[in-house]
Amino acid sequence: MKYLKYIAIILIGNVIISCSDFLEPEPSSSITTDNYYTTAAELETGLMGVYAAIQGINSSDKDENHGVQWEFYVTEMRTDNTSTKSPDSEDASDAGQLESMDVLPTNNFVGNYYTSYFQVIYRANVILENIGVVEDADRALEIEAEAKFLRAFAYFNLVRLFGDLPLVDRVISPAETDIQFTRVETSLIYDLIVSDLKTAVSGLGDSYKTRASVNAAKGLLAKVYLSLETPDYVNAQLLCEEIINTNKYSLQSNYYNVFYSELNSEIIFAIGYNSSVQDNSQIFSAEWMNAVGHTSGVNYATTDVVAAIDTYGGTRIENTYRKDPLTVLSGGTIRYQVAKYFPDGASGGSDGQTFTGLPQLAGNDWIVLRYSDILLMRAEAILAGATETTSSSAIDSYMEVRKRAGFTAATDRPSKLTKEALLIERRVEFAFENQRLFDLIRFGAAQATLSAFATANNFTFTATDLLLPIPQNEINLSNGLMEQNPGYN
């Protein structure tokens, strides 16, 4: 972790504010950890720097930490859901590795995501290190809960992608290379995640959607329980039902509004962005368009997922993907664009370029957790790893999501819910939301599904491809302390 050796400041100048749903006052400048955190107000300002690390830098510069903005490369693009438009082009070569499941340890997107999320962990640890400046005991508990939620969020994403990781649960010195570069077992990382989220559940309120909340912590913990090597289905179900029973959340009647009516009733936790200003906006939605971002289009829907959406998507189809207008107009091979994240909700125009303002400065929030996920996780928890269930509660939750897509209880309610049907529903409900890879792994379907997809597309897939390589730069910096994942040596 190079930043642990060289970073002496917390970069909070690029904090991103979404609507009025964020912490005040706004942070400014870069301030050293040695002299900054002397009051609770200063610590709260620093807490926003943790969110800034998740939001990432709106830039096409590969040396910048992009946080969640480049997450689709290391998640969705490694599945049967998306691909890059021109995998052999110079700009897209690293993306092409991810699409073809032939990833090198030097892959820029892999390295960027790894360092971005360890930056989140680092900043959260700095906050936790300075809790003592808060004199109000209740406020100190709230700040601790929020910082631990963010640390758990970062570690949960990392452990599912990389497996065993360095366990860094405090601020460490550059000399502590044994901690920086020694990977511990995945189970120990999950122990920290669960502990952090339990603290978050006990200490957070429910006032925010683009900041941590008690229900975001419960929802994330439910997903963690479902992701454990030995899943805790009982507690996952209880947490989902606690969220449902708050009556605080509901499905949007129009699927379009989930993505373009921000902070709506379905959103539990989202990463917030505002348009037009470089430091407050995002670039990922522009990158998915033709000739708008710095590439010719990435994260395109595969024909495989299009077929699934056409069959099972119902009314979600038109708001999930569309035919790429440039390939239609040119008479070329038809490609399909993601339709959930046109910059700022614009239609995309005939060629993907007619927007109000610059599409590279889009303000679309990135949704991490929404109510339909809670409903389907509840069904998954009740299913408890079985191939099917006749539980009316599981079927009710499943059908609540299906009804929004235009299906009816009279004609479409099953007498039993199968594991396969639930996985299909998650695929079409959350297409292009970076969930497919983790769903396949959690359902035990990744090996068969991705092997078949690889064979059909002349890719090579093995079980070791389910984990990404540890970035080569980290291996080099460790001077032999850090071991590479199997299959990448």
Image (cartoon, rainbow, N blue to C red):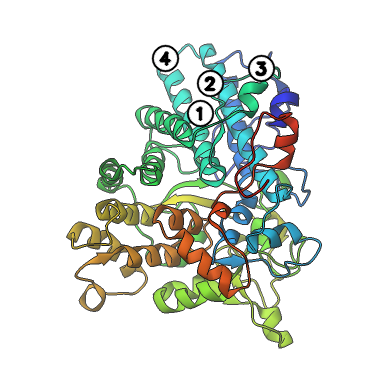
Viewed as shown, does residue 4 lie left or right of 311? right
Label 4: how many Cα within 10 Å (few below 14, some 14–19, many 20+):
few
Q: Do labels 2 and 1 touch, CB within 8 Å?
A: yes
Q: Earlier in the sequence, mark 2 or mark 4?
A: 2
Residue 118 picture location, percent across and down: 62, 34
Say which residue label 4 marks: 137
Mark 4 belongs to which amino acid?
Answer: Ala
Which numbered disc, 3 or 2, marks the residue closer to the eye?
2
Instruction: Report crowding for label 3: few under 14, some 14 to 19, many 20 or more residues within 10 A (C-alpha).
Output: some
- Name the disc covering residue 123, or none: none
Residue 355 visible somewhere in the drawing: yes
Identity, as a three-letter code, of the amino acid under mark 2: Leu
In-front residue for pair 344/307: 307
The kind of residue on which mark 3 rests is Tyr
Task: Quote the CA–CA distance across marks 4 and 3.
Answer: 20 Å
Relative placement, left or right, of 171 versus 257 is right
Distance CA(mark 3)–CA(mark 2): 14 Å
Identify the residue position indicated by label 2 in the image: 128
